[in-house]
Structures are given as structure tokens and as C-alpha cells.
Image (cartoon, rainbow, N blue to C red):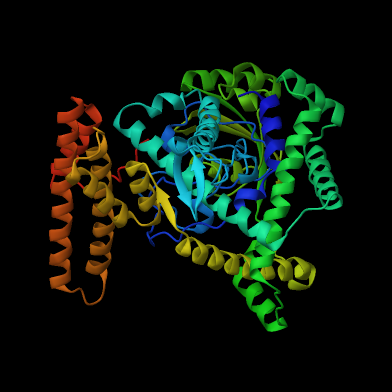
Amino acid sequence: MNKTLLIILGLAVAIGLAFWLLLPAPAPETIDVAETTSTAVAVTPTPAETVPPTATPEEAVAPVVQPTPPSTPEEAVAPVVQPTLPSTPEEPVPAAQPAPASTVPTTTAAAADESNVVAEVNGIPIERAALTQGVQTIISQYASVYKQMGQDFESMLAGASGYSLRLGIEAQALERLLFGSIADAEVKQRGLVVTDEELDAEFSAQYEKFLAAQGLTEETLRSLLVSQNMTLESFKEGGRTSIRDQLLMMKLQAAVAGSVELSSEETQAYWEKNRSKYDTPEQVRASHILVKTEDEAKAVLAELEAGKDFATLAREKSTDTASAKQDGDLGWFGRGTMVQEFEDAAFSLAIGQRSGIVLTKYGYHIILVTDKKAATQAELADVRDRVEADAKQEVVTERANTWYTEVMAAAVVTVRDPMLSAARQQRINIDLGLEAFEALRAAGTVDQPYLPYIIGTLYENRIQNLTRAKTQLEASETPDAAQIAELTAQIQEARDKAIAAYQETIQLTGSDADLEARIQALQSPTQTPALAVPE
């Protein structure tokens, strides 16, 4: 993906962030997902300049699918599908925003074509066209990220894992539509509106902030848009629509939360709990030249030592084509952003100092540190206004989440597609989802050869959770032998059922190397199978 498009996508994020970010989500089963890759992250409006071409799908973006649901409400409906690139030398990659609920085709109960209705919430129909549009939006987001890394996301939608992935995306899109319908009804009932004055002020503020951050003029942006067959006028109109929805959802959130007044003691408690958020960590700005082989790196280093310009060599030699266009510049980053080897080298160098050859899983780097910022620790007096606003917003968010949980629990939701209905159950609670999929298999009413595969992945997830619980119990000061034995038996039962499910999938669909590998791992008594996330 070229820089022009990244800038445009960055603006799309900058002027349309909060609509879906404000929406809470179903309270999922509490599961430690630290070791999984199923994460959706909200982006900041800062276009990335570089993604190593060797990044793998696992390091890129784990689709919001099975078997582990997000661990927080924000993750469950996080709209911006950003790559999870742990420990890689680049900034976050913004992706295009999904259409807010108000821009998705809606249908009244009277006007709906029954044959096209896929779900209903409180008597309000959700039509197939709306779901299809929502699914395509999410797929497009993933595709744009994978394309930047030279990978074809569409190809990942094939086969058993591809079907499971698509079904998870459908469930994600459906959840957004269900809440969109409920939120829309609540907005109308409360008579909430966004005035033209409010819209003009907020759009102008976000728009000007973005232009300043990117060093763009409006005319420069116009040219960039024209190069992508877009007009500034239509782009602004789309941004205003997103901002209007954003402001409307903020009003709804505030309305359901009610008035919030905090005492000085409550503000102080929030500060003590969150003070690190207001500190500025140590940061480095660096450029790099990335090549594939050590011999290439030695040749580049020799040229640098002979006096050749670093920026020129980065443009000519670096395989990280995105940063190469910026003379190798990676921008500012803190600790925990890069792979460890890269981080260690960058933070150990002085301003203007160049590294030797640094080997990471992406290849051979030569790093030049161009600037540094020391860590600073904030004092409450300096950030009191921010702290008070954030403390109030935390209360508002908690109350809005409670409201959402209650209205969704009270909502009458009917999903007509049985597989999609089971997938929705899985998003809410994995065990409920497993029961639903198992019931479909037992009934034999669904002609879907990949149904056993999904069941197998969910049993693998159960193995992970049971194994984690067993490990924690064994490490406790007073391990209960009976409980450990029971967990061991449950793990074996889940292992047997996962193997049987995968074997059934092979019988229905033919030989599959991935499934064979899963079965072999499950059958090995010395291995705990990796979490079955269809990548």
C-alpha cells in the first residue's frame, strides 16, 4: 500500500474514529487471551510508513473469530481492524472505517422482504443486504492490511479455516447491526440530535488537526485524493457523516449514563490508579535499512563507512519499501514496539549514532538514531483537567456498558441462519457456542461439511483453558489432587472430541494437511496443541 493511500486512510480514521469505539459489546466469558492472537485494536490516527514485507498472518491481524472472544467490551466491537504487529519496527497501520449503523441499509418491519431477513431484534428486521455490506466492510479492512504485507486475505477465506473465519466475521457484523438498531431506536426515543453548529465545529477541529499532524495543506490533500480517484468534497462529506454519528453516539452514551459528579477523593483515587497513563515514556526516532542477507548488509555497511548518505542507501537498498520512501525513517517509537533485538540496538545508540548489523526475524538491519526523548513523569497539578475528564469518562463508559448489557439481555433477538445463530452464541459465550454447534451436528439439519471443523477448534480452545486452569492449580500452595485429576480427565475428553471432529471433517471434505497436523499434535501425549484459530 503506498503512502498516498495510507495518508487517505489515516484521514478516514482521524475523522471517523469514535462511532464504533463508543459502542459497548456483549459481556463475554472471562478468558485470559494474552496468549492468543484473536485481537482487534482501535487505531490512532497516525498513518504508518512501514510494515516489514516478511510479516506473517499471525503477526498481522487475527480476525475477530473463534475460538476466543474478546476479553473486553471494546474489543468485541472494535471497528478498526488494525494489524496486531507485536514487536515489529513500525507504527500502527490505520485501516478504513466501517460504515456506521446509520449508513447501513435499514428496513422497517413493514417494508422488509421476509425472504431477505437474516435476523430480527425487538421486531426490527436485519436484511441480508445490510449484513453483506457489513461483512464486506470488515473483509476490506483486513484485505487492505494484508495487501500492504504482500499477502492475499481473500485466499484465507478458502477451505475449513476460511469458512470458520468468514462465519466469525458475519457474527461480528451482525452484532454491530443488532446494536445499531437498538441504539437507533434509543436515539429516536430520547430525541437526540446533532446540530449543524456542533458538527461544523467538531469536523473542523479534527480535520485541521489531521492536516497539521501530517504536514499537509488542503490542496496537497486534494491532489492525493485525486490520485486515488476521489474528490475532496466527497471525502469531506463522508467524514462529516462519520463525525455526526460519532457525536450522536457520544450524546447517547452521556444520556444513558446520566450526570456524573466526582469528589476530589474519587479524582485522586483515579489518578493514583492511572498515573502512568499521563507519563511520557522514553522514545527514540530512528531510520533503518533492511536487507535479506548478511552479505548485503555488509556491503551496505561498507558503503556507509565509506561516506555514502544513509538516506540515499535506504531509498536504494532497503527491502522495507514503505520506510525506504521516507529515507528509512520509522518515526518515533517507545519500548515494546519493536522486536527485542531492534529495540535493544536503537535504545542503546546516541543521537546520530549508527548501529552495526542487527539480525531480527525480518532480516538484517542497519539502524540510525536521529532523535531521542527522555521519559517524563507527570504531576497531577499539570494534568488535573485531563484526569478529571478521564475519570468522568470512565464512569460514563461503565454506566453505558451496563445499559448496553441490560438492553441486549432484554432484547428479543432471532437469527434465522442456524450456523450464524450458533456463531453469535459463541461470541457471547464459547461454551454456549459449542453446545449450539454440537446440537446442529446432532440434529443433522445443516448441510455444512465444515461444521465438525468449527467444533474441533472449540474443543481445542477448551483444552487450552482447562490446561491453563490445571497448571495454575498444580502451582498453587495446596494443589487439590482430585480437582487436578478431574481436569486431566476433561482435557482428555476434549482432546478425543477434537480429534474425532477433525477426522469427520476429513471424511466429509477430503485430506487436508492442516487437519492432519492438528490431529497429530492432539494425539501426541507430550504436546499441548496450539489454540485453534483459523488464520
Residue visible at 22% across and 27% down?
A: 513
Q: In the image, what residue occupies the spot 26% across and 34% down?
A: 450
User: Toward the viewer: 299 or 493?
Assistant: 493
Would residue 212 be seen by someone viewing this image from the given angle? yes
The image position of residue 311, as x and y in percent, is 70, 24
Place of residue 485 in the rendered image (x, y in percent of width and height, measured from the top left): 12, 66
Residue 327 is situated, as x and y percent measured from the top left of the image, at: 69, 25
How many numbered circles are shown?
0
Residue 391, percent from left and from top: 67, 70
Query: Could you tell me which residue is drawn at 22 percent across and 48 percent down?
Result: 438
Q: Is residue 227 above or below residue 149?
A: above
Closer to us: 127 or 214:
127
- Quadrant where the C terminus is found in the figure: top left
Q: Which quarter of the picture shows residue 235?
A: top right
* Relative to 460, 300 lies left or right: right
In this view of the protein, can residue 339 be seen by the observer? no
Of the 4 image quadrants, the one containing the N terminus is top right
The foreground one among 450 and 516 is 450
- The picture quadrant where one finds residue 304 is top right
Residue 355, relative to residue 222: is it above or below?
below
Q: Is residue 493 left or right of residue 398?
A: left
Left or right: 124 in relation to 488 = right
Above-or-below relation of 399 to 141: below
Judge by depth and name the residue closer to the eye, 81 or 386.
81
Q: Residue at x 70, y 79 (%)?
A: 262
